[in-house]
Image (cartoon, grey):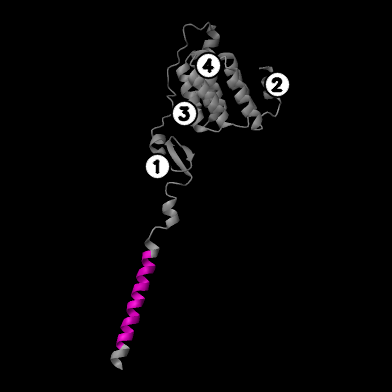
Amino acid sequence: MNLIKQKLVFYFLALALVAAGFLIWRDLRPDEESVKNTNEVSKEIEVGNGISIEAEGDVSGMVVEKIELKIPDLSRPIKISAGLNIPEKTRQELVLQIQEISSTLKGNSDYLQGWLQLGILRKQIGDYEGAIEAWDFAGVLRPDNATSFLNLADLYAFYIKDHKKAEESFLRAIGAEPKNGYTYFQTANFYRDILQNTAKAEEILDQGISSGADTTGDLQTLFDSL
């Protein structure tokens, strides 16, 4: 009888050890949902100088791209294009304004309006590369704001004459603010006046009207005039 009791005690001890081992393994094992969501969660990716960008979905390949992102050189030389007929007083004012906004951005590089303004000033002195850098970075900071993309589109279309990049920028503006009628209006004008492509102008206007962006009726008016 004692032998049977000993065997039963041993048997229950073994079961207890197995159960305890399972519980420990379960606690240590990564949660299945956590593993699944490792690369599928909203994350803020630090890009330096206090700037972070929110990203959703699989960010495994995006991290490298964002880490390589560099803030435009805020000490970029201020050279006014020789072909511009700008009075000396205005030249001095433009230089001073660029210096001031650059200084502000050095202290706060997440300042969207500062980058937009810097781009405008750089464009005014004929520094198109500097303007592009500023507006490109503004588009990275606020990808859901159409202004930087529209500024780039205007620069490419009417100054640099790179119609491919102009079209890309116009479409990015629409993608940033799909309910903003002005983005469709300007894009349609680009297709009509620059590319001489009425069909594309009608197509983009129809897209804006269908999406509910024509709150003022301007898109329909332009569409009817084509």
Q: Nearer the viewer, mark 2 or mark 4?
A: 2
Q: Quadrant of residue 204?
A: top right
* Secondary structure under the numbered disc 4 in the rendered image: helix
User: Where's the C terminus, which quadrant?
Assistant: top right
Q: Quadrant of residue 224?
A: top right
Mark 1 in CB contact with mark 4 (< 8 angstroms): no
Is residue 155 in view? yes
Q: Using the numbered discs, state the Cα–Cα distance from disc 3 to disc 1 in whole angstroms.
A: 30 Å
- Where is residue 176? Give x, y as percent: 56, 31
Figure disc tally:
4
Q: Using the numbered discs, state the Cα–Cα distance from disc 1 to disc 4 in whole angstroms.
A: 35 Å
* Secondary structure under the numbered disc 2 in the rendered image: helix
- Where is residue 51? Give x, y as percent: 47, 36
Dominant SS of magenta comes to helix
Q: Is residue 125 above or below residue 32?
A: above
- Where is residue 8? Give x, y as percent: 33, 85
Q: Residue at x 60, y 32 (%)?
A: 178
The earlier-in-sequence mark between 1 and 4 is: 1
The earlier-in-sequence mark between 3 and 1 is: 1
Q: Which residue is mark 1?
A: 60
Residue type of the residue flagged with mark 3: Lys
Q: Which residue is mark 4?
A: 157
Using residue 60 as the reference point, say whether residue 205 is left or right of it. Answer: right
Residue type of the residue flagged with mark 4: Ala
Using residue 2 as the reference point, say whether residue 38 is left or right of it. Answer: right
Q: Which residue is mark 2?
A: 221
- Where is residue 56? Give x, y as percent: 48, 42
Foreground: 67 or 92?
A: 67
Q: Which residues are magenta?
A: 6-25
